[in-house]
Image (cartoon, rainbow, N blue to C red):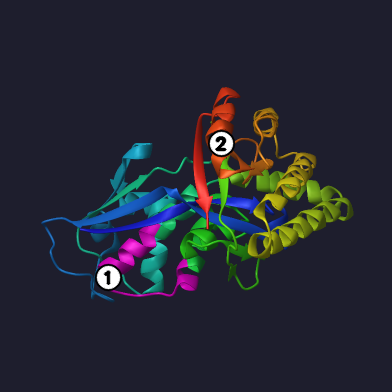
Amino acid sequence: MITASAPGKIILFGEHAVVFGRPALAVPVTQVQATVTLAPLSEGSGRVKKRRANAQSASWQKKVLIEAPDIGLASNLFALSSGDPPHPLAFAATVLLSALEVDWLPPMTMRVHSTIPVAAGLGSGAAVSVAMIRALLAFLDRHLPDRRISALAYEVERLHHGTPSGIDNSVITFARPVYFVKDHIIEPFHVGRPFTIVIADTGISAPTKESVADVRRLWQSDAARWDKVFDKIGEIAQKARQIVENQDPSLMGPLMFENHALLQSLTVSNSALDRLVHAARRAGALGAKLSGGGRGGNMIALVRKENAPAVAEALNSAGAQRTIITQVE
């Protein structure tokens, strides 16, 4: 058996504006993981063959099983690849095989398990894609650089989200804090002083694809107005990077509240997120904002390490379905 894992992620600053070319900051969340385990079936012990003569696509794909008990999925690669669009789990596998010019696998089971909440802004889809790609690379005894793995995972993200920024697949692949500008070089960056974040899940499923599309329609209605908002969000992200690298991280607090207000103007917050932001502030958080696509999913609060349990308790009392305390370093 071969197993590969990938962490979750949170966006500190820059969500939505990053789709329009402004910078964003994101960090991995190692407390939650997506894991893919490959187990060859007894019927075929041979390794994959490259450009296998007369390989019948439907035949071998029907013997490659994909199981994801967390979402009640159990099917074969052929069935999951045949949809329009194909299932993201199958697409993650086939996009890698195509890139490697591999057109046959022995019978096997691909088992997917994730502790990352779905549609909650923690990058569950990208984490599963990265774990799937890395598991297959290990099985095939092949290597690709992180930038190539990230690019392949981005192709799956496009299936999920339509016009994604690329930040999820980037920070999850590199498993390091990342400064990201769409269509530019990805910059993993150094954290000068560790800091503590409390992540609170509203329990509301909110697909990023929908909020991204709504923000695009908003921008199309008055590009000049919303470009100014995106510019402000981008400036906040730039200031935050300087703070994270060189200054006291607590200085990010006011920037988080400011960023949340800008996201409210973009209509991607909601009453549940706003309630949690207010609860974190009352409990002594240094800053708080929604994280990710919005309309549900997660919010994050910057806290002093010793105050993290109290803020987490306050968020739970205010309606959070779960909280995660994570150290960024």
**Label 2: which residue?**
200
Q: Position of residue 274 (x, y in %)?
A: 70, 32
Q: Secondary structure at mark 1?
A: helix
The answer, for residue 325, to whether it is visible in the render is yes
Q: Secondary structure at mark 2?
A: strand
Q: Residue at x 13, y 62 (%)?
A: 44
**Residue range highlighted in magenta:** 131-149
Up-down relation of residue 1 to residue 326 (above or below): below
Q: Main secondary structure of the magenta part?
A: helix
**Label 1 vs label 2: CA separation?**
39 Å
Q: Position of residue 48 (x, y in %)?
A: 23, 70
Determine whether, in the image, residue 296 is placed left or right of residue 103: right
The answer, for residue 22, to whether it is visible in the render is no
User: Is 146 included in the stretch rendered in magenta?
Assistant: yes
Foreground residue among 162 and 69: 69
Up-down relation of residue 104 to residue 14 (above or below): below
Up-down relation of residue 18 to residue 314 (above or below): below
> Residue 301's quadrant in the figure?
top right
**Label 1: which residue?**
140
